[in-house]
Image (tube, coloured by chain):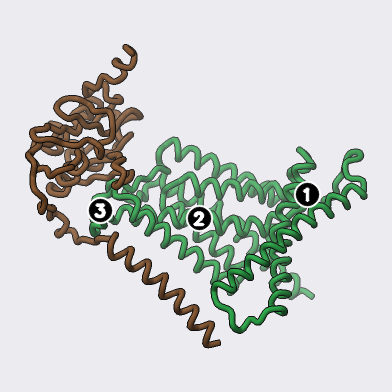
Amino acid sequence: MKKKHIQNILIIAIIVAIISTFAYFKIDIQSVGGHKKLNNSEKTIGEVTLSINCNTINDNYDMLDDKLKDEKYVPSDGDILKEEKYTIHNGDTVFDILVNATKKNDIQMEYSGSDSKGTQYIRGINYLYEFSCGKLSGWMYKVNDEFPGYGCGQYKLKDGDKIEFVYTCDLGRDVGDTYDVNRNGD
Amino acid sequence: MSGFARLHPISIFLFYIMVIIGTVICTNPVISIISFMAAIIYRIVLKKAMVIKEILLYLGIVVITALFNMILSHNGQTVLFYLNDNRVTLEAAVYGFSSGIMIASVMAWCRSLSQDFTEDKILYLIGNISSDIALILSMVMRFIPLYKRQSVKVSEAYGVINDNENENIADRLKNKLRVYDSVLGFAIENSIDTADSMKARGYGCGKRTMFHRFSVNKTDIVYIVLIAVELFIYIFSIKNSTASYSFYPVIDKINMEKNYLIFYVSFAVMSAIPLIEEIKWRIKWKYLTSAI
């Protein structure tokens, strides 16, 4: 009886230890007020600007979900975040700056994909999600007025870059992306 | 046999199809809760105290679904706290809770389905279309309790051989694997035996007939009409977007206007059919025994 008990307790203790070490290193719970602190320990290599805009929704307002038809979610000028300056550190990607900006301004943002592989996909900003305004809608980003065409977690920034996150209602055609025209020319 | 199981197979089948699909399609938490309550009360009336473990399982499912949705979904306006820089919101929790209730109620309905909808009813319903499919279905349904019983037998036999006292988790796992191994062997052997036996009795020569005692009564017709009316109201409500409900970015208010109330009440009446039938049979039984 005793041997059995000791072995069971040992196994449970090991499992609890593994879970708690995982929790200690991986899980970070913050209160509503305390999450805005940014990590500024590394050396900066320059400044970039970022803006978030959803003006295309105002042109397709009838396609928008009924619950999102509110000045809170879709501002009349489309600016969710006006152009703002951010310092960048070595190796910062567009995604890192977006995370910093949404944290600092307390804007809701959800993404899916892996942080370590840099395959993040922005599902929604400020409660406006993919498919919220028609079947061809979602978030895209441009850097210096060009659409890179790959994930924002892989775009390494340099000094003076101008990042714009724009909401499209037509697969990028209404915000000036010309990837399909270029494809046809190939 | 429950009172509901005495009905004609077609009305039982229609009821379960309607209640399960109706629960799954609609995200409205009112419908989920009505369905869950109806299913649980029916289980309690049927099984009494034996159902407590089952209810604990359902509650566990609800809590786990709510937790998972809180971790995985970051939509919603009311922020509770931040987890690894992601919002954990009240809306996500409520959505998880509601869908957990939906899953649990479907599980509860499926449990009573397997109790009310026995093999002879499956054979009766599908036998007219294809006797082969009906036979396979009823055999598959039988395999689950059969293997359960066999695994109990095998593990009891192992228990005699082994010293149960000094078992730890690793030993127990090893024993479980051995039991699984021998039940697998039994399953293969059993299927070959069954096939041989069926062949020896002349399976597949000539057309097969079937004996059954099912007949459509007045109550069956009443219930089938009730289910049809509910189906009509349900489809109408979905078209009317009365049934639609969304949790993001803010939880919808639960509407209590006339057409919403019709939708809820009709679903509640429909999902109470087995309960009504069971209570009706119990009263009838009491009346009959008191007359003796």
Chain displayed in brown: A
Mark 2 or 3, closer to the camera:
3
The residue at the far top in this view is A185
Q: Is residue A103 above or below residue B53?
A: above
Residue count near mark 1 (Cα–Cα under 10 Å), binned few <14, some 14–19, many ≥20: few
**Which is more toward the observer, B19 or A142?**
A142
Which residue is under mark 2? B35
Q: Is residue A172 above or below residue B134?
A: above
Secondary structure beneath label 2: helix
Measured Cα–Cα span from mark 3 to mark 1: 58 Å
**Which is more toward the observer, B178 or A167?**
B178
For disc 2, the chain is B
- Residue beneath the point at 13% across and 47% down: A105
Which residue is under mark 1? B215
Do residues under tags 3 and 1 come within 8 Å of each other at their CB atoms? no
At label 1, the amino acid type is Ser
Quadrant of the frame with the N terminus of chain B: bottom right
Chain displayed in green: B
- Residue beneath the point at 29% across and 50% down: B74
At label 3, the amino acid type is Arg
Residue count near mark 2 (Cα–Cα under 10 Å), binned few <14, some 14–19, many ≥20: many
Q: Position of residue B181 (x, y in %)?
A: 68, 62
Task: Identify the mark at residue B87; answer none if there is no mark.
Answer: 3
Q: Is residue A64 visible?
A: no
Measured Cα–Cα span from mark 1 to mark 2: 29 Å
